[in-house]
């Protein structure tokens, strides 16, 4: 006696009770091999972040061949599968055309449209799960000569099995997840606007070239900024043999304990030559300061001797200087003062660092500028944390709202 296998997701809306159906992809999707007879020049590429996007928009140029009349022409709402491995898509990415009415893709892509009585938005979400990718992985092989292009034929692709509910449940799932997508996009857009706002402020809050004052100032401050040497503002901190302090690592997001970086610890077992850093110091990568690789230190510890540690002097608010060091003007200055024949050998030791001239306001104005920029950083960080939680929430929902084939 055999028992028929039934399919239902772990998490579903209470009004739905019917089992999900197992079908071949070819039963719900029609392959598209429509050639570009109209010579449409909107050549598309697949981006993990933007989906199907024009090469002109993505690369600022068209990287396709001059003659694209043999390409596939797809319409808005239709899908394309890029068989190449890419970041986050081990078995290739499947994306719908959403931003344009029409576009063309290489014939290396597999294109298709979802047939009536099915919801396109549901399938857009379905293809973002690992469920269908796992199906592809069962039949796809990577050709040694194909440079990451998966060896899966169109027949094999459309013969893959999927599990789907009624169209009413498809629409409900799609609406739920797409509303989360809208919220995720909204938070992502806000982060980008905050970053652009900060970038604009930094261009205005610090003097340009040899100007004595910046373009934008807080109304309570007046008078010229003073020209000082960085050696008048910072001493080099060379404190070693502090082996009991935690090992820290410099990252794009600041200075953090090394074990939190998720990177292999390549530091020496003997930490006696490692440098102590204290709260308020600025530490920079001696070989990469020409790229602006520095951090403001907010925790005590030790760092590799590959870094230079700068200790602020009296009436110096180091966080102000950290933001100054991140401006394009200062990065260019650091590049000019670094020593070495090529970029890979450039270094900026404290001796050269200390001889650089900068314009410096009063301590009160330093603190005000730093407070303004750090408040924006705090808001960016808050929204980035919110974005991460939303993305994790959606990922968790998708693992429960779709059915895996056993």
Image (spheres, helix red, strand yellow):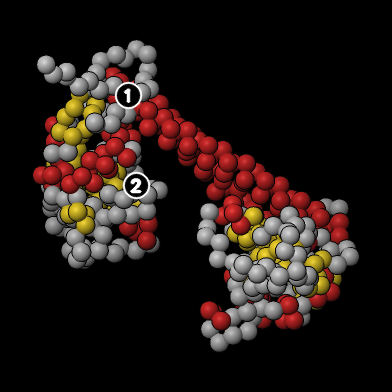
Q: Where is residue 365 in the image (x, y as percent from the top left)?
A: 83, 57
Can I make out residue 308 in this image? no
Residue pictured at 66% horizontal, 59% vertical: 248
- Please name the residue that numbered disc 1 is placed on: 9
- Tell which of 388 and 77 is nearer to you: 388
| Quarter of image, res 19 | top left
Q: Is residue 134 left or right of residue 59?
A: left
* Picture disc at residue 277: none
**Separation of marks 1 and 2 at Cα, in angstroms:** 27 Å
Residue 209 in the image: above or below residue 176: below
Up/down of 234 relative to 320, above or below: below
Q: What is the x, y in percent for residue 405? A: 24, 31
Which quarter of the picture shows residue 133? Answer: top left
- Residue beneath the point at 61% across and 57% down: 258
Q: Determine whether, in the image, residue 135 is placed left or right of residue 27.
A: right
Please identify the residue farthest to the bottom as the structure is shown. 341
Residue nearest the viewer, comparing 3 with 215: 3
Classify 182 as above or below 95.
above
- Which of disc 2 and disc 1 is earlier in sequence? 1
Nearer to us of marks 1 and 2 is: 1
Nearer-the-camera pick, 61 or 267? 267
The residue at 16%/19% (across/down) is 4
Q: Mark 2 points at which residue?
A: 51
Closer to us: 38 or 75: 75
**In the visual, does 303 lie left or right of 22?**
right
Residue 401 at least partly seen: yes
Mark 2: which secondary structure?
strand
Where residue 249 appears, x then y in whole percent?
A: 63, 60
């Amino acid at each position: 006696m055999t028992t028929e296998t039934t399919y239902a997701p772990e998490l579903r809306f209470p009004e739905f009770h019917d089992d999900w159906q197992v079908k071949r992809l070819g039963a719900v999707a029609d392959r598209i091999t429509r050639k570009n007879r109209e010579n449409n020049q909107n050549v598309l590429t697949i981006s993990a972040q933007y989906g199907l996007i024009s090469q002109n928009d993505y690369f600022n140029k068209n990287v396709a061949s001059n003659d694209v009349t043999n390409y596939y022409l797809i319409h808005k709402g239709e899908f394309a599968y890029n068989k190449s491995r890419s970041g986050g898509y081990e078995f290739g990415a499947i994306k719908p055309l959403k931003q344009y009415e029409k576009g063309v893709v290489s014939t290396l892509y597999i294109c298709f449209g979802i047939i009536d009585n099915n919801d396109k938005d549901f399938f857009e979400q379905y293809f973002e799960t690992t469920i269908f990718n796992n199906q592809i992985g069962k039949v796809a092989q990577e050709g040694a000569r194909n440079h990451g292009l998966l060896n899966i034929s169109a027949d094999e692709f459309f013969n893959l099995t999927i599990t789907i509910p009624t169209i009413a449940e498809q629409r409900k799932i799609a609406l739920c997840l797409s509303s989360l997508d809208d919220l995720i996009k909204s938070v992502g857009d806000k982060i980008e606007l905050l970053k652009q706002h900060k970038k604009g402020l930094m261009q205005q809050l610090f003097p340009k070239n040899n100007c004595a004052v910046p373009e934008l100032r807080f109304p309570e401050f007046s008078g010229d900024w003073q020209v000082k040497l960085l050696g008048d503002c910072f001493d080099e901190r060379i404190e070693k043999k502090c082996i009991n302090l935690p090992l820290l690592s410099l990252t794009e997001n600041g200075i953090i304990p090394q074990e939190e970086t998720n990177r292999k610890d390549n530091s020496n077992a003997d930490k006696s030559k490692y440098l102590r850093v204290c709260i308020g110091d600025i530490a920079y990568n001696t070989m990469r300061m020409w790229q602006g690789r520095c951090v403001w230190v907010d925790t005590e510890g030790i760092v590799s001797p590959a870094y230079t540690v700068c200790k602020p002097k009296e009436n110096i608010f180091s966080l102000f200087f950290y933001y100054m060091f991140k401006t394009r003007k200062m990065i260019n200055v650091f590049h000019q003062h670094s020593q070495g024949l090529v970029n890979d050998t450039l270094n900026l030791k404290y001796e050269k660092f200390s001889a650089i001239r900068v314009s410096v306001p009063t301590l009160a104005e330093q603190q005000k500028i730093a407070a303004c920029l750090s408040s924006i950083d705090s808001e960016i960080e808050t929204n980035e944390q919110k974005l991460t939680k939303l993305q994790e929430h959606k990922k968790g929902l998708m693992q429960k709202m779709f059915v895996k084939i056993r």
